[in-house]
Image (cartoon, rainbow, N blue to C red):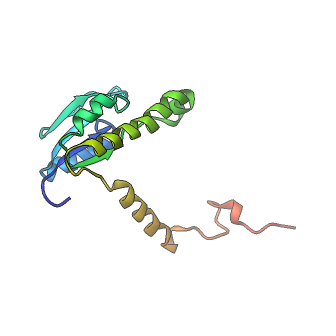
Amino acid sequence: MTKSQSVLVTGGAGFIGSHLVEDLVSKDHKVTVLDNFSNKQPKMSGAGFEVIKGDVCDLKSVMEVTKAVDVVYHLAAVLGVEYAYQHPTETLEVEIMGTRNVLEGMRKSKSDTDCGDMNRRLEQHARARLLQESIWPEPASPAMPFLQPRKN
């Protein structure tokens, strides 16, 4: 994203999302945050962005906020592995149907909406890091005991 664009960040009140919002606002993008505040942190400080309390599981809300955006960063998710384990149906609803709703909103929006390439960038960074031999411990390292030779 080089020029100023209209950006939607789902889950923008969460830890990663709020930092992304700060970065986007600092680069003069028009940012809209869609979040249900399930993490119980409804305080978002700063100016330069609009906050909409809503849920990615509500297709009507998602369709409304995706109408006029250029880019969508979909970060809405259930918070915490333990919660996800204890609430599998809700987790599937948010993770799968929420993502479906965001994609449907993007598909039906009148603008040429682009799904933010954050995952692609993270994957490229991870692959580059994995290729650096210096990050891997020696095979006999206590950090990786399963790589130590077997004793017969």
Query: Is 104 left, or right, of 110 in this rendering?
Result: right
Picture quadrant where residue 148 is located: bottom right
Residue located at (20% from left, 32% from top): 51
Quadrant for the N terminus, please. bottom left
In the image, farthest residue toward the right: 152
Of the pair 83 and 139, the residue shown nearer to us: 83
Q: In this rendering, is residue 137 above or below 45?
A: below
Q: Position of residue 105 (x, y in %)?
A: 30, 40
Q: Position of residue 94 (x, y in %)?
A: 43, 33
Q: In this rendering, is residue 69 above or below 36?
A: below
Of the pair 120 and 139, the residue shown nearer to us: 120
Q: Position of residue 56 (x, y in %)?
A: 35, 33
Q: Count numbered badges in the picture.
A: 0
Query: Is 129 left, or right, of 112 in this rendering?
Result: right
Residue located at (45% from left, 38% from top): 95
- Kindly tell me whether residue 133 is visible in this rendering: yes
Q: Position of residue 82 (x, y in %)?
A: 54, 32
Query: Is 150 left, or right, of 103 in this rendering?
Result: right
Residue located at (34% from left, 41% from top): 104
Of the pair 107 and 51, the residue shown nearer to us: 107
- Kindly tell me whether residue 18 is visible in this rendering: no
Query: Is 45 left, or right, of 85 in this rendering?
Result: left
Q: In this rendering, is residue 113 above or below 35?
A: below
Quadrant for the C terminus, please. bottom right
